[in-house]
Amino acid sequence: MSVITEDNVRGVGGENLFKDISADGDDITEIESMCMNCHLNGMTRILLTKIPFFKEVIVSSFNCDNCSWSNTEIQSAGRIQDQGVCYTLKVKTKQDLDREVVKSDSATTRIPDLDFEIPPFTQKGALTTIEGLIDRAAAGLQQDQTLRRANYPEVADKIEEFIQKLQKLKEVESEFTLVIEDPSGNSFIENPRAPQRDEALTVTKFTRTMQQDMQLGLRADDDLEEEPAGNDIETMKDEVLGFNTNCPECNAPARTNMKIVEIPHFKEVIIMATNCDSCSHRTNEVKSGGATEAMGTKITLHVTDPSDMTRDVLKSETCSLSIPELEFELGMAAVGGKFTTLEGLLKDIKDLIVSKNPFICGDSSSSDRFEKLQAFGEKIDKIIAGEMNIHFILDDPTGNSYMQNVYAPDPDPDITIEKYTRTFEQNEDLGLNDMKTEGYENEN
């Protein structure tokens, strides 16, 4: 058996992917098969390989020695996934064009900036790069241009103009968006920073529709039963729900996304995020997914190491916080509900007190006040850098705030949790004194 060469596995864009995915010891199967170009026999080479942080795929490469025609395809080596997947990539630099892409037959490829879409099942699956995907799309549009120029010259000119726009994307003169939506869940865009989060790449899972199930052969074509509503709580946990609202900054129509998230060793919370396309204002908010607890909770963390900055923190809108070493206390509604890390919460505090404080600029500012706030900001920076040990206290009368226990399920030696009975004033602030949940039906 001859050894497969690097030239056998190349995308339309000329990128070389074989050296990235093949490894010593991979078995390559060779099958003699007919060439679809000259109808003589050529050789198909098949390689089963694993893409890091993704799954196993089958790469097949055909090469005809008679007419030099070659073709490369990719198929998933696994089953159709339980949910579909949608990758949204913001291409900002030329380095992003080198990201590897697995595009299955059932995937839809879109470039919203050009109003361009490649429907599912119109191309074979491919293992390529972003650049290769663009070149492949341009090559597909270029195929019948000669015939079009003879019969429909105006259409040919428009298509040629669009091909030039596609090719210009490779210069990345401005940011553009690439979307790959695959109901089978078997497509993939590389995250070069894996296992860390990629800010430019958004991955969302979704439940297939009845039509998508039919396209994938998971449901009979004559199955016309109505799709279940999917309003149960388990279905909602796996979906990102959205509703229309207005931007709190410019009042333009915007969309708020909402998702139920379960925090380990705690409870469920609802995360809401709003992004305004008009003014680019972004907000996020966390709501408790459960009822008000019978007792309040006071959580005290002794910060002794920089690694404490990575602890997850859930601060409800009713939670106040304090840092005794800085003689600092922040009321319950100052920064709203947050689900972030301790570092993120400290940065929000610094922005609120220092960066976004209207009383340190303009006519109302004074040098003394400005210096004190700047000194406070420097102390926050020292805490984040691990140069200052403090006690960070979350006091939530509703009991709906949380600090991550990195030793869970064992006790955390640096965290102290106290339960307490709310005072009348706290119940009054929360509206609980006038809330009657038992025996109200007997009242007139």
Image (cartoon, rainbow, N blue to C red):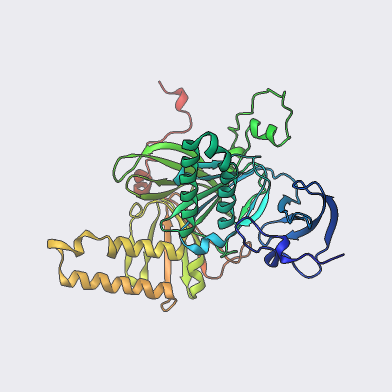
Residue 62 drawn at (x, y percent): 76, 54
Up the image or down, 437 lies above or below 357; here it is: above
Which residue does the image show at 60% across and 57% down from the upper left? 13
Q: Residue furthest bottom?
A: 387
Which residue does the image show at 36% across and 53% down from the upper left? 332
Regarding residue 289, the answer to whether it shows in the image is no
Residue 440 located left or right of residue 50: left
Which residue does the image show at 41% across and 56% down from the upper left? 174
Residue 414 drawn at (x, y percent): 52, 70
Up the image or down, 43 lies above or below 270; here it is: below
Q: Residue furthest left?
A: 363
Rendered-image quadrant of the C terminus? top left
* Along the line of sight, the residue nearer the viewer: 206 or 151: 151
Up the image or down, 378 lies above or below 195; here it is: below
Name which quarter of the figure residue 345 lies in: bottom left
* Along the line of sight, the residue nearer the viewer: 357 or 209: 209
* Along the line of sight, the residue nearer the viewer: 311 or 216: 216
Q: Residue furthest front?
A: 150
Residue 221 drawn at (x, y percent): 72, 26
Residue 444 located left or right of residue 197: left
